[in-house]
Image (tube, coloured by chain):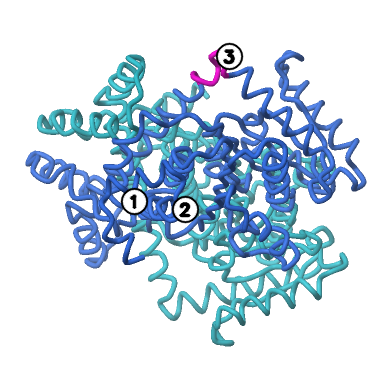
Chain colours: A cyan, B blue
Amino acid sequence: MTELASLDEQELVVRLRRGDQRACARLMTWAERNDPRFAVQHRAFCDELGVAQRIGITGPPGAGKSTLVEGLASHWRESDDRKIGVVAVDPTSPFTGGALLGDRVRMSRLVLDPGVFIRSMATRGVFGGLARATDDLADVLDLFGCHSIMVETVGVGQSEVDIARSCDLTLVVLHPGGGDTIQAMKAGLMEVADIYVVNKADMPGVDRLVQELFDVLELREIPEDQQPPILTAVASTGQGVPELAEAIDGMVRDRRDSGRQAERRQDNLERRIRRLVDGRLRHEVWQARGLSDLLHQRLAEGGKLSAYELADEVLDQYQQAAGHPANLLGNISQTDPEDSP
Amino acid sequence: MTELASLDEQELVVRLRRGDQRACARLMTWAERNDPRFAVQHRAFCDELGVAQRIGITGPPGAGKSTLVEGLASHWRESDDRKIGVVAVDPTSPFTGGALLGDRVRMSRLVLDPGVFIRSMATRGVFGGLARATDDLADVLDLFGCHSIMVETVGVGQSEVDIARSCDLTLVVLHPGGGDTIQAMKAGLMEVADIYVVNKADMPGVDRLVQELFDVLELREIPEDQQPPILTAVASTGQGVPELAEAIDGMVRDRRDSGRQAERRQDNLERRIRRLVDGRLRHEVWQARGLSDLLHQRLAEGGKLSAYELADEVLDQYQQAAGHPANLLGNISQTDPEDSP
């Protein structure tokens, strides 16, 4: 680490391009910490990005998303020696070490494969927002030379679903016996799926779940030729994984050729920029301008004030400060917990 | 509605205080739409707030949160004729009409009780953020005269958990056979619980789940006297519900007496103000200053630009505009989708 610490920053990107794992990890750490050095690097290498296909994988806890990620990674490693990146934004993911021993042992095979780079992120403690960090990590993996990047999120909260959606393609993974699966899907999951995967297809209730999915698609009145395909798999045994991998690759090809991928990337880029701007403004208000202190002071004075009234006060102060543009945009510290409290 | 539409706004609050359901619904609609009239009203009545106890209820889909809410509501209605408010921020909740027929029939008994006011919110289409709207709805229910307000959210995504946490007391509801329950709990659920409820306690696996909970609490090294109690219930039959209601009431009393409730409310107020300020700034940047248009224009020009570079451009423009304070803070339109896209 001391060796890398003294590395010229330009050299870091050169190393990353050549597939240096430690350079990759270093840049990812900068990204996670919202270190301003990452933004500098990003400006330098952004025109090389967009080579990898990015696949978002989401679904309720227990659907077997990580096992499926592992299955797809193994398949692509064997079939065409494809370099794989994984970003697990999921505290329940075995990649984060939160799993049963059996899962961890299985995952360790992947972890030891130099053709697979796995990064797991806790949902707390990432500065400047999870979605921002996820995009940045995927960019690093892109430059690192990964052909397929899988982004795994738990798919119940809206923000988690949105992260999976910010990929070229989104898989929604379900399992029979999930009970409230279809219910849970109303939380935005339904709309983001490019492919449905009914995993654990060796368990009872598969046919019913598939039928329910068809019913929901019909209710939404999506023309048949535009309906997301519904595939079944048993990720733990590998059953259905080659077919899924093929469906993904085929869809990526089609979308690249039809220009739909470019459109989607444009939309994702716009959302990403909005998040960046919002994050910087939050920093500006609360840290750089010291309005956190003002707020604490006002709160300490007590009395029953309307939240709206105090918000106005803070914004008034900000407005006055913004009249003096010095320091308005700079000074993004790397220890800035923009997304807290 | 025409009658209410012509209502003097001051009269609306007078009616709300007297328990007028339509006035309540009207103010809630303003709150959901982030209508500036709500903020005006809020300033006027904020010093009357804080009477009700607010209980956040969260947990994975399928844990039976809504049934538990219904059970608690029924219990409190019968035991002391307590007026109850429910805010369901949960697309999987039967309150939102997304449930099985049996559930809906059961819920309808509550819906017909004039002593219970239920409002369900979709997680999409609420302007200015879900958490903001939830706080505002709870305030309306407080002024409406509710003694206990229950806020139900699905507890997997961080933002949903945070909403449940912004109450006086947070219940985390789990069920045996949830499979990845303990795993899912790492997503921030573990830390927010004031009381754990193991629901569906007539199903196999209860003892194991309770033991797992104890183990996790032990791992976190929480002193025994500060550990959140773990209660069991079968909400569908009412078993354990009176005991839970008593535990909630007792904890609310203790915290009120010890001053801990006031502390927690202060923390919640601070987070709420931060959310308001952030929302207003987002509006300011993207709507009032027309920077959405600028961004679209830049994106349409094409070329591979770094997200960071474009974010800088937008912020530069904002900085210049902010030098002219006119219109900087006003003009929050009621059709402002602050939290999209």
Question: Which residue has dot 3 on it?
Answer: B257
Q: CA distance from mark 1 to mark 2?
A: 20 Å
Residue A340: which quarter of the image? top left
**Disc 1 on helix, strand or loop?**
loop
Question: Viewed as shown, does residue A73 lie left or right of A13?
Answer: right
| Residue type at the position of mark 1 | Asn
**Disc 2 on helix, strand or loop?**
helix
**Where residue B113 appears, x then y in whole percent?**
62, 53
Q: Chain of mark 1?
A: B
**Nearest to the observer: residue A147 or residue B307:** B307
Residue B105: which quarter of the image? bottom right
Asked if one can make out residue A112 in the rendered structure from this viewpoint, the answer is no
Identify the residue shown where x is 68% and y is 55%.
A60
Q: CA distance from mark 3 to mark 2?
A: 32 Å
| Residue type at the position of mark 3 | Asp
Residue A205 drawn above or below residue A162: below
Identify the residue shown where x is 42% and y is 24%.
A6
Question: Which residue has dot 1 on it?
Answer: B34
Residue A190 drawn above or below residue B245: below
Span shown in magenta:
B256-263
